[in-house]
Image (tube, coloured by chain):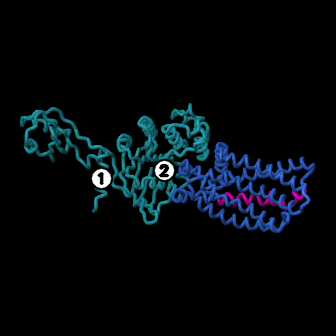
Chain colours: A blue, B cyan
Amino acid sequence: MHRLSTILRKEWRESLRNKMVLFGVGFLPLLLVGVSVYMVVEGGGTDDPIAQVVLFNTSLMYFLLLPAIIPLAIAVYSIVGEKDQSTLEPLLATPITDLELFLGKALASVIPALLINWASFGAFLGITSILLGGLPPHVLTLPWLVSIFGLSPLLSLFAVSVTMLVSSRASDARAAYQVSSFAILPGVIPLIIYSSQKTLVNLRLVGIEAVVLLVVSSVLLRFAIRVFRREQILTRWK
Amino acid sequence: MITARGLTRRFGDLVAVDRLDLEVRKGEVFGFLGPNGAGKTTTVRMLAALIAPTSGEATVAGQRLGAANREIRRRVGVLTETPGLYRRLSARDNLIFFAKLHRVADPAGQAERYLRLFELWDRRDAAAGSLSKGMRQKLAIARALLHEPEVLFLDEPTASLDPESARTVRDLIESLRSKERTIFLCTHNLDEADRLCDRVALFNQRLIVVGEPSRLREEMYGRRTVVHLVEPRPGIEDALDLPFVKSVERVDDALVVSLTDPDRENPLLVERLVELGVGVRYVNELRMSLEDLYLDLMEDDDAPA
């Protein structure tokens, strides 16, 4: 635990000094909260039920994108940064275990992603409540809450696993970022499904996505842990 | 302090290290010399319990490789070829981070101690990326020492440093020798190895030779005396018919004479030359450098069997 928390603190300290990471972690949530508020307020004011569904679902999608985008930004720079600075070997020469290193890197990305996402959702609720004079309609429902609090950790886990696998083979942060970007797909796919069915977010679809994400993330996580072995890092990573 | 028996590492078909037998004593500075791609870094990685050998065994700081890898990593310090510092973190934060990973009792205190020792205290809050090459290298050495390791692996510690910084690093290594630490030094700088190392090993995928630099030179070249003559006569080398003279070679105005025991035989040699009517300007011992030895041995190693 001691070494894990040491890694976590170091990762965050480094991230706070990286402008690219700060942009992803700081500016993007602000932007997405603003757009979500706009959509819900607009949706509440329209009489067209289909337009209303699209606006509400899209605003939810933003809170499913953040848990994937934020860890992606942190993890890419965390791993490619270690390669770029040639710090992996000195780090691996310490008594730290492979699992401690992996968990340190993974949690350093997942924890801020979830906290920022939930804080953004709180800000979104607060602002829309003020603007609409109460909680926005069709938002504080069980499917929404399950999506925000249940799917987010899985989405983050998926994004971190993908990013770690991609970053282990990449020597350039931008290239790793681009390839890892498909990790946000699980946050976008539900919107496409909902839009085609012209239905609001519902528990059945959220459940299906949760199960699929859990299975895929578990498989990816196992691969990522395997890639994160000392010997692999020193002899196979680019 | 380090013992290796038949240590081998293969990467697919490539044999990076082939049946290495080695013994490094406690408190000595041991030079590990070899060309690029000889397998030096792979050897260090194996001995520092970073990668596993394909076969063979080793003990480092009393711990068996493979069975006690984590304990080995607790007891050794590694300076990699590049300093490998977190550029955005300050010099002090870099050290505190590694001190915590090694579970040093007082990370901040130990970081301060080494920053002061290596004259980096004034730059403690500067980002590591903003430090000069020499400072970064000193900081990396400090990092390798923070947990007071019994064995220190230094991989090319002065490579790419300017002469002044290289000298500072060499002085640091000298000062560490007096603290009874075992230092395993990989270097291309043969002059540096000659000056710093108690023993050296020449290595090119396999061990070629190991020993004290002076003894290796003596074994390879013998001890040779150079007699500078006032007016060398033609054929003088043939006239030196003393029983202890193994060989004589004429080089310009000097004779290079191979002897068994120069301390005893030099006066007799000079006496004989004077008897032969040859004026002697001065006499000195021919010292072959470690570089000569290295190049000759590596050439022999490359030569087809």
Q: Which residues are magenta?
A: A137-162
Marker disc for residue B297: 1
- Say which element carries label 1: helix
- Depth check: B179 or B29 in front? B29
| Helix, strand or loop: magenta stretch | helix
Q: Amino acid at mark 2?
A: Ala
User: Label 2 lies in what chain?
Assistant: B
Q: Which one is in front in this view, the residue at disc 1 or the one at disc 2?
A: 1
Position of B269 with respect to B157 (left or right) is left
Q: Residue at x 44, y 55 (%)?
A: B43
Tag count: 2
Q: Quickly name the residue at label 2.
A: B61
User: Where is residue B109 drawn, in percent x and y?
Assistant: 60, 36
Residue A200, given in percent of the width and then of the height, sits at: 85, 63
| Label 2 packing within 10 angstroms: few (<14), some (14-19), many (20+) | many
Q: Is residue B34 above or below residue B94?
A: below
Residue B110 visible in the displayed image: no
- The amino acid type found where label 1 is placed reads Leu
- The correct choice, above or below, for B24 with respect to B227 in the image is below
